[in-house]
Amino acid sequence: MLDTQVKNELMTIVDTGRYLDRPEELACYAYDAFVVEALPDAVIFPETTQEVSDIVKIASRYKVPVTCRGAGTSVCGAPIPLRHGIVICFSKMDKIIDVNTRDRYIIVQPGVVNVDVQKALAPFGFFYPPDPGSMNTATIGGNMAMNAGGPRCLKYGVTIDYVLGMEVVLASGDIIRFGSKNIKDVTGYKLSSLFCGSEGTLGIITEAILKVRPLPETVKTLMVTFDDLDNTAKAVTDIIGSGIIPVAMELMDKLTLNTIEDVANLGLDREAQGSLLIEIDGVKEACEREMTLIIEKVKENGAIHVQEAKSEVERERLWTARRSAYGVFAKLAPDIVSEDVTVPVSKVPAMIRKIIEITEKYGLKVGVLAHAGDGNMHPMIPANKADKEEWQRVERAFDEIFQAAAALDGTLSGEHGIGLAKSDYLPLVMNKQTIDFMKKIKQAVDPDGILNPGKFV
Amino acid sequence: MKKKTPQNCGKCGLCLNVCPVYKVLKEEPASPRAKLQLIKAYENDTLSSSPLLKEIMSKCLMCGSCTTNCPSGIDHYSTFMEMRRKMVEDQGETPAIKSLTYLLAREYRLKFGAGLARTGQKFVPDLFARNYKLGNIPLKNFPTLNATPFRKAHDVIIHPDKKPVGKVVYFTGCATNYLYDDTGVATIGILKHMGYEILIPRDQTCCAIPLLFHGAADRASKNITTNINALKGHDVDAIIVDCSTCGEALTNEYPRFIEQQGQNPSEANAIAEKVMNILSFIDQQFDRLEFDPNITEKLSVTYHAPCHTKNNFNAHIIVERLIERLPFVDYKRAVDADECCGGGGTFFYEYPEVSKKMVDKKIENAKAVNASQWLTDCPVCRMNLAGNLDTDDPLKVLHPVTLIYSALKDI
């Protein structure tokens, strides 16, 4: 419970309906899709930047931790209020402020759901490329704080590549604005790079100007299966190596395909050892040429079945299958850990071999899933956290997976973020001076450490 | 006794954007994910029963969209139903809901209640009816009760005018019996036209879904037994329902309930296998319909897919296809045709502020397509949609069977 004085002051900013602190309500803000949970003392729903600023000023004065949350779909524990305090939930600060496709931008509040941005743009023939698996639920504020990616980021880049400008509330309660409506803007530091991906540790995003793109003329989607997982991975390396950049290239292994098929009944090939869901887009003629080349490359690597989606319905089915992977794995055990180590694309076959070797060594089940075109792995391990012995094996396996990725010039996280899941592993990919430099930045902007404390800095 | 929920929720949150209540409230406790978390905490004794916990559990339309869309295959629907029962056991029920379940638990009470209410409706002063609301619906917009209950007004066995092609049982549900006899009249009219002999068992009663939603398992048990006895053992082609919620109860809940009671579910299973939504039945035998050739003008029609049609029978696609096939219809789909209207059994009464937002959006989008008829195959949806339109609104809400029946050729 917050101190009565603090609560009373906060209640002057929002009405009763936007302040929750009964145990049943707090229990609903203790989790995201990661395995660690912690209860907040209060949950507050601002609707304007000024309200956020006023809330943070109070928190700053009383040194109460503040953790921000959108829809709570993070898979690394980023919105978990580890040190309790206030959760600022942005779900009700959800207005689309301006859609301007002539100048190619959209201005939104942080609580707008990713898919609603797409819906607002589609009638104008535009889209916003970052497409995390949770895009139907996840908010733009959360996407930005985590610098979210998604399958089509292979071609289009991740969230940070689409941020033109931001409004941020600092730990002091001060409101700052930077960037602009311009595609080109080198005025001052590129502060968006500082806040986008800061996981709520440096400031609170209250508004964003995002770059948008015209929808491509043609989209082609291909499902390819292999009788060997290693060949599947080599096909990825070959395609990217030949200079083609597909929109997405999703790799799924046999266990993943079968687990999805058990639930969704989509007619996936249960016998295949590996599969690739490949999508390309652009001008029709270019797509056709690229498609021919891709088919050549997969056949060279021993593809046994190549099938093009013939309709939008069929395409949607394939993507539904891919997007449901995390959910279907969740039902295999009480808990699921999905990490997102990333390696240069030429190292994808080696990394997959490592993942299989390590999980076999620890006697664990693993689903190998990857945004393979950009080397972004998603090994998913279903396990029971209550089973201490098994959980230890899970932790050891991930230790080794992180080490293996680092040894292959890879990195800890391609798109999920560090959160609570990977903070211990930072030294694997960063030297002490770099970690100290991040700490200095944190110290400078949030001297009392009230913003999302207990996380990676 | 607390029974463990053996299902694994990965907390992915994909249920949030399919939950109509979450989409309006934008608060986690409204979400299916949160409800599962709270149930887990309650079962592990880390969270005790409370009026607030009960309220969170009740603030749910029981639409089943989370169950349909969950990638982990969790059966939220049954889990929530069971938790609601426990909450009523722990916390009791509000007087209004208590009297509803009391009423629905016995056919004679229902009959008596309907008679009283009908008399009451006549005596409600106009001024009072104009100004007061029940839930989100103004009193004046409630349907008037049937002059005579539908089943009382019709024979037990109805013969077609021609040589029968088959035989069906008709489970009318309470709504057709007491509120919307036009649905019943149209259903038997169409079935007769198609050449079916119709059996309407006298001793059927409320399907018990409202009782199960409100945790009145004991009362539900009696209704379920009564209905199984009324429906079993008939040598018929199908057991026809005109309401998807009744259909869902007969298909899924009855066998499950009987099994939970430790009894043999074979009778319930045999019934479940024969249950069919009237609209799917018509769709399958569309060629048996002959339409009045004098109807030359096309009627513009839109459709609202009830959640229980969508999530239990997955039949909204069939219904839309059927509507499109009607030669006298120009079907205009509303953008949110398959979104929940906020009716949800008694939800519109318990949470009018949430329900109102949903229904207003539905009305806005239905009006945008400029249709004159708004079809829906659930009596609660119909009551909610019609109840929130002005009485003199040109848009009329009815069951698809009424429209189909009105266009049939006399034979």
Image (tube, helix red, strand yellow):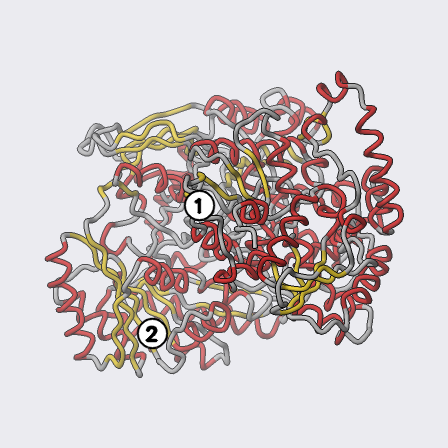
Separation of disc 2 and disc 1 at Cα?
60 Å
Residue farthest to the top, as pictured:
B127
Q: Quadrant of the C terminus of chain B?
A: bottom right
Q: Which element is circle 1 on?
A: loop
Q: Amino acid at mark 2?
A: Ile
Please give the name of the residue rendered at 81% of the width and 41% of the height, measured from the top-left corner.
B97
Please give the name of the residue rendered at 80% of the width and 55% of the height, measured from the top-left corner.
B205
Give the side of residue B197 with respect to residue A425, left or right: right
In the rendered image, residue B237, in percent from the top left (x then y), is placed at: 64, 70
Mark 2 or mark 1, whichever is nearer to me? 1
In the rendered image, residue B93, in percent from the top left (x then y), is placed at: 83, 43
Q: Chain ID for label 1?
A: B
Asked whether B61 or B101 is in front, the reply is: B101
Asked whether B355 or B325 is in front, the reply is: B325
Answer yes or no: is residue B95 visible: yes
Residue B379 sits in which quadrant? top right
Residue A335 sits in which quadrant? bottom right
Q: Is residue B100 above or below residue B242?
A: above
Q: Is residue A135 above or below residue B145?
A: below
Q: Is residue B183 above or below residue B71?
A: above
Q: What mark, if any, has residue A207 been given in the picture?
A: none
Label 1 Cα neighbours within 10 Å, binned few <14 / some 14-19 / many ≥20:
many
Please give the name of the residue rendered at 63% of the width and 46% of the height, measured from the top-left corner.
A28
Answer yes or no: is residue A201 visible: no
The residue that label 1 is drawn on is: B328
The residue that label 2 is drawn on is: A352
Give the side of residue B43 with respect to residue A331, left or right: right
Q: Which element is circle 2 on?
A: helix
Q: Chain ID for label 2?
A: A
Q: How many marks?
A: 2
In the rendered image, residue B373, in percent from the top left (x then y), is placed at: 51, 37
Q: Quadrant of the N terminus of chain B?
A: bottom right
